[in-house]
Amino acid sequence: MQFSKLTVYFEEPFWVGIFERVSEGRLSACKVTFGAEPKDYEVWEFVLRHYDGLTFSPGVAADIKPMSDNPKRRQREARRQARTPIVSTKSQEALRLQREASKTERKRVTKEQKEAEAQRQFDLKRQKRKEKHKGR
């Protein structure tokens, strides 16, 4: 069973959306900053155009509650959740894992770039020395 959920709330100074996806008993999340308050049709358009390109966090084990078949009950639950826009702690944990993964990746890439630049500078210095000695 797989399902997705989007929660849009105001986080000073921007409007933020948290996409939560549960698949095979694991919850993964993605945080999107909208900026100004998005209209319903703008959110829907964003989901249709950009959902495939979202980078979700690694999955975290999650308990899945079965959905109610009663549409009135689902409507009441949606209204109750709309009044209290609290992001689940599982989503926060998934986002934290995603931030840590991107941080380590960014550090690795930066380190490689610095080493490559240092090697280039060293090779350039060595080449200049050789050119000086050839002139004698």
Image (cartoon, rainbow, N blue to C red):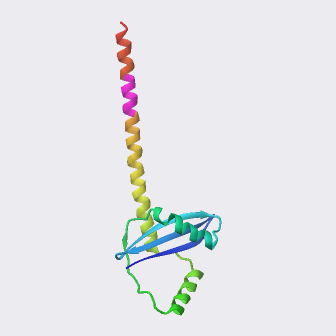
Evaluate whether residue 87 shows in this view: no
To which quarter of the image does residue 9 belong? bottom right
Q: Which residues are magenta?
A: 118-125
Which residue does the image show at 55% across and 82% down from the upper left?
81
| For residue 49, above or below residue 69 | above
| For residue 32, above or below residue 105 | below
Q: Is residue 50 left or right of residue 116?
A: right
Q: Is residue 59 left or right of residue 19?
A: left
Q: Is residue 98 magenta-colored?
A: no
Q: Quadrant of the C terminus?
A: top left
Q: Is residue 121 magenta-colored?
A: yes
| For residue 114, above or below residue 56 | above
To which quarter of the image does residue 28 belong? bottom left
Residue at the far top in the pictured view = 136
In percent of width and height, residue 109 lies at 40, 46
| For residue 57, above or below residue 118 | below
Residue sitting nearer the eye, 103 or 55: 55
Q: Is residue 33 left or right of residue 52?
A: right
Q: Quadrant of the N terminus?
A: bottom left
In percent of width and height, residue 125 lies at 39, 23
Which residue does the image show at 39% across and 33% down from the upper left?
118
In percent of width and height, residue 76 lies at 55, 89
The total number of labels drawn is: 0
Which residue does the image show at 46% across and 64% down from the upper left?
52
Which residue does the image show at 37% across and 71% down from the upper left?
60
In percent of width and height, residue 85 lies at 56, 77
Evaluate whether residue 129 shows in this view: yes
- Magenta stretch, main secondary structure, is helix
